[in-house]
């Protein structure tokens, strides 16, 4: 594929996710010209990864040299397309929370790369830790407790950093390495997050960490906009220097492309814009499609479900009686590109895998998603019946198991409003005509009503709209349920073609990176705005007011039962 003057200049967005390295090329109209992916298991069998990582009980890591090799391979394939010379800016994203530990030799090697030799060969002795801890790791419970104690408690840690201590966060991971591998720790010269690590490889120097990804470390003082000296010192007195004192916005230029890539891959020297975490980058990509002055929540329905939404005010304060301080679940991050905003991030581990489990167990292993949708496309079950489906230990709330409840005049569980519920192992037939209460409907209501509850814990203002994405987002029944339960219009990314509008989502973290590179190019060259963008947010459905009113009335009972389930007093029944 050869480039023409019609598609130049181009902007490269990268996303180093768990399973692959993705790349997208945008033209100046923010239309995708080319997409590529390097799947780690397929391309690098010598590292013996499963879905891009190594799992040893609660310890989950990824080979850092595999990531290095993937950068080279993607660039070589990019060169083969003939598009490389037209690239005028690069940015991107990576999986959040993971960390890379440089030896001083690696820092120096990165500054003087030989374009005749592969990155993997040159970085063979560059890293003190060859297996980087990643976001799936949950082996740092002890370090989490220590960090909360150093902060003065979980509430104080959340007030400072936006989150209570989480095993996957970078701070506890760093502490574990120092405590359990002192001989390795003594070799560490610098520490990068996975996002800033990719940027470091591209600029030939240690790139600064951006503020939004720093918010996922349990070490960053979100309101002050700098590393918390106290928290960092509780791990190591030199940790701020190891991380790098400078923290940047995700739309700042952090350097120019290293000569290694200009000479080896024929890419012109161009600005490299800061890399950030995959979720903040995706959110920034969606915001580029919003109408001027408007924002919305982003709901990603995938293996896990994620909700991202902007906050004008920081929700955690010294007022411990506030709603937000009473509910420290979820995370608050610095907005990647707007210094005056924050982002709330709600993560639900039991997403599509739980929906798939319900489909198989309620409709049969050979059932289709069309059959699931048909079973789920009913009148609201709430407040007459609720189901909770936590196959894996859930994040919001912290609970595990399958639970079902039905209203019953003699029920053993009494809500504050006096409504009684009884635990059941299977749902009974509804009194509404011939319809049946089903697990298919119950799981959808449960998942989206949880989003309502947790949104209200962080943001007092009404939600204005939802941009929906992820593998399950194309299901019309789920789309309408999201709209009915949350009470807002739902939008999806769409591309305008000669045949009309096609609902289609790009790889959003990489797309968000390419958009930031494009925006910087426009600023540096005084180019006019990106009119004519082919990617837009297309309205796909609006709430049914009658059904939404039912869910609003049912929400208090739902939250009470969810708390009851997470308290541990209820016995699971599949």
Image (cartoon, grey):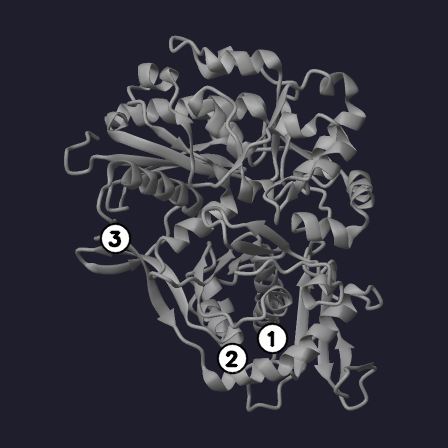
- Residue 232 x/y as whole percent: 72, 34
SS at mark 3 in the image: loop
Q: Earlier in the sequence, mark 2 or mark 1?
A: 2
Residue drawn 31% across the image and 22% down it:
269
Q: Which residue is mark 3?
A: 534
Residue 449, picture quadrant: bottom right
Horizontal relation, residue 149 to residue 12: left or right: right
Residue drawn 48% across the image and 21% down it:
69
| Mark 3–mark 1 CB contact (< 8 Å) | no
The residues bearing labels 3 and 1 have C-alpha atoms spaced at a distance of 40 Å
Q: Earlier in the sequence, mark 3 or mark 1?
A: 1
Residue drawn 69% across the image and 73% down it:
559
Q: Is residue 253 above or below residue 147?
A: above
| Mark 3 burial class by Cα count in 10 Å: few <14, some 14-19, many 20+ | some
Q: Is residue 426 above or below residue 29?
A: below
Q: Nearer the viewer, mark 3 or mark 2?
A: 3
Q: Earlier in the sequence, mark 3 or mark 2?
A: 2
- Residue 276 x/y as whole percent: 50, 40
Q: Which residue is mark 2?
A: 378
The residues bearing labels 2 and 1 have C-alpha atoms spaced at a distance of 9 Å
Q: Residue furthest left?
A: 5
Q: 256 or 493: nearer the eye?
A: 256
Residue drawn 74% across the image and 86% down it:
417
Numbered badge on residue 438: 1
Q: 134 or 326: nearer the eye?
A: 326
Query: Is residue 413 in view from this perspective?
Result: yes
Horizontal relation, residue 536 to residue 484: left or right: left
Residue 230, picture quadrant: top right
- Residue 547 x/y as whole percent: 51, 83
Residue 314, picture quadrant: bottom right
């Amino acid at each position: 594929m050869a480039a023409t003057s019609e598609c130049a200049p181009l902007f490269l967005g990268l996303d180093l996710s768990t399973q692959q390295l993705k790349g997208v090329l945008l033209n100046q109209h923010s239309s995708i010209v080319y997409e590529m992916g390097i799947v780690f298991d397929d391309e690098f069998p010598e590292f013996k990864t499963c879905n891009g990582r190594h799992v040893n009980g609660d310890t989950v890591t990824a080979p850092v040299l595999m990531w290095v090799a993937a950068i080279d391979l993607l660039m070589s394939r990019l060169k083969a397309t003939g598009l490389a010379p037209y690239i005028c800016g690069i940015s991107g994203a990576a999986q959040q929370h993971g960390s890379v530990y440089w030896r001083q030799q690696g820092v120096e090697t990165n500054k003087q790369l030989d374009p005749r030799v592969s990155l993997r060969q040159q970085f063979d002795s560059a890293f003190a830790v060859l297996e980087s801890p990643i976001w799936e790791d949950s082996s740092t419970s002890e370090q989490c407790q220590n960090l909360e104690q150093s902060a003065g408690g979980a509430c104080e840690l959340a007030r400072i950093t936006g989150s209570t201590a989480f095993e996957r966060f970078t701070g506890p991971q760093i502490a574990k390495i120092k405590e359990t591998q002192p001989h390795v720790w003594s070799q560490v010269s610098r520490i990068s997050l996975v996002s800033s690590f990719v940027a470091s490889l591209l600029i030939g120097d240690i790139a600064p960490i951006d503020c939004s990804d720093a918010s996922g470390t349990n070490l960053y003082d979100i309101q002050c906009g700098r590393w918390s000296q106290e928290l960092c010192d509780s791990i190591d007195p030199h940790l701020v220097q190891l991380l790098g004192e400078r923290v940047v916005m995700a739309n700042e230029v952090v350097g120019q492309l290293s000569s290694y890539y200009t000479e080896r891959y024929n890419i012109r020297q161009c600005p490299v814009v800061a890399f950030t975490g995959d979720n903040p980058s995706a959110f920034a990509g969606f915001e580029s499609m919003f109408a001027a002055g408007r924002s919305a929540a982003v709901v990603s329905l995938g293996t896990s479900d994620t909700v991202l939404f902007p906050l004008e005010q920081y929700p955690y304060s010294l007022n411990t009686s506030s709603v937000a301080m009473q509910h420290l679940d979820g995370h608050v991050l610095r907005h990647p590109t707007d210094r005056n905003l924050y982002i709330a991030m709600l993560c639900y581990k039991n997403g599509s895998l739980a929906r798939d489990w319900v489909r198989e167990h309620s409709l049969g292993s050979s059932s289709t998603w069309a059959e699931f949708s048909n079973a789920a496309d009913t009148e609201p079950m709430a407040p007459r019946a609720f189901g909770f489906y936590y196959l894996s230990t859930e994040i919001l709330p912290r609970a595990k198991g399958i639970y079902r409840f039905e209203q019953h005049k003699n029920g053993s569980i009494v809500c504050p409003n006096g409504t009684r519920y009884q635990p059941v192992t299977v749902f009974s037939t509804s009194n509404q005509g011939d319809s049946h209460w089903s697990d298919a409907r119950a799981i959808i209501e449960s998942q989206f009503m949880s989003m309502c509850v947790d949104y209200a814990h962080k943001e007092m203002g009404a939600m204005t709209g939802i941009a929906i994405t992820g593998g399950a987002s194309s299901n019309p029944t789920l789309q309408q349920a999201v709209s009915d339960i949350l009470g807002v219009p739902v939008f999806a990314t769409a591309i305008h073609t000669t045949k009309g509008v096609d609902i289609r989502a790009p790889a959003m973290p990489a797309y968000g990176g390419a958009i930031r590179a494009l925006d910087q190019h426009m600023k540096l060259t005084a180019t006019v705005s990106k009119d004519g963008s082919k990617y837009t947010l297309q309205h796909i459905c609006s709430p049914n007011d009658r059904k939404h009113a039912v869910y609003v009335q049912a929400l208090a009972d739902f939250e009470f039962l969810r708390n009851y389930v997470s308290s541990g007093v209820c016995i699971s029944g599949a």
